[in-house]
Amino acid sequence: MATKKSDFDKVLSAWDVLVIAFGAMIGWGWVVSTGDWIMEGGVLGAMLGFAIGGIMVFFVGLTYAELTSAMPQCGGEHVFSYKAMGPLGSFICTWMIVLGYVSVVCFEACALPTIVAYIYPDFLTGYLYTVAGFDIYASWLAVAILVSVFITAINIVGTKTAAILQTILTVIIGGVGILLIAASALTGTTANLEGQLFMGATTTDMVKGTLAVAVMTPFYFIGFDVIPQAAEEISVSLQKIGRILILSIVLAVLFYALIIFGVGYVMNNSEIAVAMKGVGGLVTADAMAVAFGSSIMAKVLIIGGLCGIITSWNSFLIGGSRAMYSMAESYMIPHVFAKLHDKYKTPINALLLIGLLSIIAPFFGKKMLVWVVDAGNFGCCVAYCMVAISFVILRKKAPEMARPYKVSHYKLVGAMAILMSGFMVVMYMIPGSGATLVPQEWGMVLGWSVLGVLFGFYCKAKYGSKFATHIDVAVDNEAVEEAGDLAFGQAMAAALHDVESDAPVTYVSQPLSFSFSMPVSVVFGAGKRHMAGELFKAYGTKALVVTDAATNGRDIVNEVEKSLKEAGISVARFAHITGKSLDITADSAVDEIKKNGSDFIVAIGGNTV
């Protein structure tokens, strides 16, 4: 099977991987929605809801962990689904995840100046117009546009630069969250928990409240899937990538649960209800003020949450640009999006497009972007379900595939991941579920789907046999550890050690050269393509070079042909092989041999060639 060398630089350490995923998952939701969660399910009910939701995402995360370690290539879902379901399944899966990533980036561009306005109300000046009841101000737009340009530029300059920004902001978020939890533990009282451990007069009502929270929670965990998108840029072993991915999910569940407890421990039910009716309804910020006895600390927490907006924004910009790059590499969308920056090795055109969308988005107001995000969440859940299905298919279809992070009891894990991710998708469709898409959101899903179909037809017509092709990236053996199953506790301990040690993998390229006969002759080593003429001249004076669409035009084909011609061998080329070549293709090649009177064939490309 043909492979290629990765075009990306391996710059992300174990810590970088963790903060990119964890920072994306904790985001801003814990500042805005904690009061809603408690009022819906109660303190303990909401914590259990997040635990249940975390279990759902945990099973999906296990499938991602195994597949990422087995296929550490840019695009993640694109590669997994391509191997399992073929081009159509891959197109649908990746197109849906791109919708999810882009929608979050655009929403965060609106969320950030909105929070600035909450902290500094006088900041809003220069009223322009109103969209769906949301007032647009010149100062509000200016902040949104400036930050959009800044974050896009940071990502273009390099993935490592973006990871450093992510680290700084995630540490701030974590520090503020820890302050709230610690202060609540010291100043709160169990009396505040009375009457709000669970919500509802009956056990049935309490269960419903808990499940209502559980249904919402998976959408707050979207973000761990950024790890497989950037897999080619990670400089830790493949087994560690899987462990860190799972660790990020576990830490996110703990963070949300402890924040819920901290708020409920320091504020009773009536105080939370009053806070929810206040300006902004930011119950978590009010809890911070109560815990420290200072209104200033409320703004400190909001600033911490503000960092969460940027971490989500940053992570999803990374994920969205890599997903677009992988589709462009397969000629499923215009190939221009597969261009990498000459110096920084980042997908510059994909980043510029998403960055441009984040600049345009604030002009449409926050209400419309809420619809976009809900549609995007639906897209992410569809992709999760397809990845879970791909996990099961590949265990059956490719049992011999190397899996450095191999999941135990794959049938159970696969079934749970499919059922739970499928459940998320269904919740968007069932009226009254609490997550049902409104007509405007369904319109956006439909519009995005139509755009995907148009892209597909356009690229099929433009690129022909190159459309929906895929070449694997060669895996460095040094990045592969011995596969082995670990118990959950052992796996978590190992993952924490991976992040603590933060030692990058050293990739060593050893020059090899050897020859052997069995009874055919194999000549192996660097530069052997330039010896083609010398090696083949004993077989005749006319050669037919057979290759495929993906390889045709690459330097290797031209260099082999040049070497043949320099040895006095005339050359004809047959470049019509595809991954789905039929007998008619072989017959055409035979006709070409007869036409040119070829003495021998030189095959360059993948296994079909």
Image (tube, helix red, strand yellow):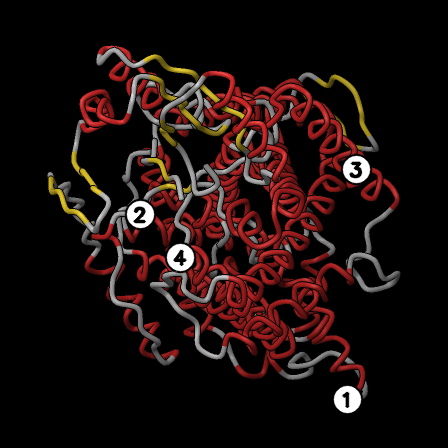
Mark 1 and mark 2: Cα distance apart in space: 53 Å
Residue type at mark 2 is Val
The disc, 3 or 1, on the residue closer to the chain's N-terminal end is 1
Q: Quadrant of residue 508?
A: top left
Mark 4 and mark 3: Cα distance apart in space: 34 Å
Can residue 211 be seen at all in this image of the molecule? yes
Residue at 42% x, 38% y is: 606
Label at residue 70: 4
Nearer-the-camera pick, 524 or 569: 569
The disc, 1 or 2, on the residue closer to the chain's N-terminal end is 1
Q: Which residue is mark 2?
A: 475
Residue type at mark 4 is Ala
Mark 2, other Cα within 10 Å: few <14 / some 14–19 / many ≥20 = some
- The quadrant of the rendering that contains the C terminus is top left
Label at residue 203: 1
- The quadrant of the rendering that contains the N terminus is top left
Mark 3 and mark 1: Cα distance apart in space: 39 Å
**Residue 79's x, y, as percent?**
51, 46
For the residues bearing labels 1 and 2, Cβ distance under 8 angstroms: no
Can residue 307 be seen at all in this image of the molecule? no
Q: Secondary structure at mark 1?
A: helix
Residue at 66% x, 63% y is: 421
Residue type at mark 1 is Thr
For the residues bearing labels 4 and 1, Cβ distance under 8 angstroms: no
Residue at 21% x, 51% y is: 518
Task: Look at the picture and state if 69 lies above or below 360.
Answer: below
**Residue 142's x, y, as percent?**
58, 19
Mark 1, other Cα within 10 Å: few <14 / some 14–19 / many ≥20 = few
Mark 4 or 1: in front is: 4
Mark 3, other Cα within 10 Å: few <14 / some 14–19 / many ≥20 = some
Nearer-the-camera pick, 561 or 428: 561
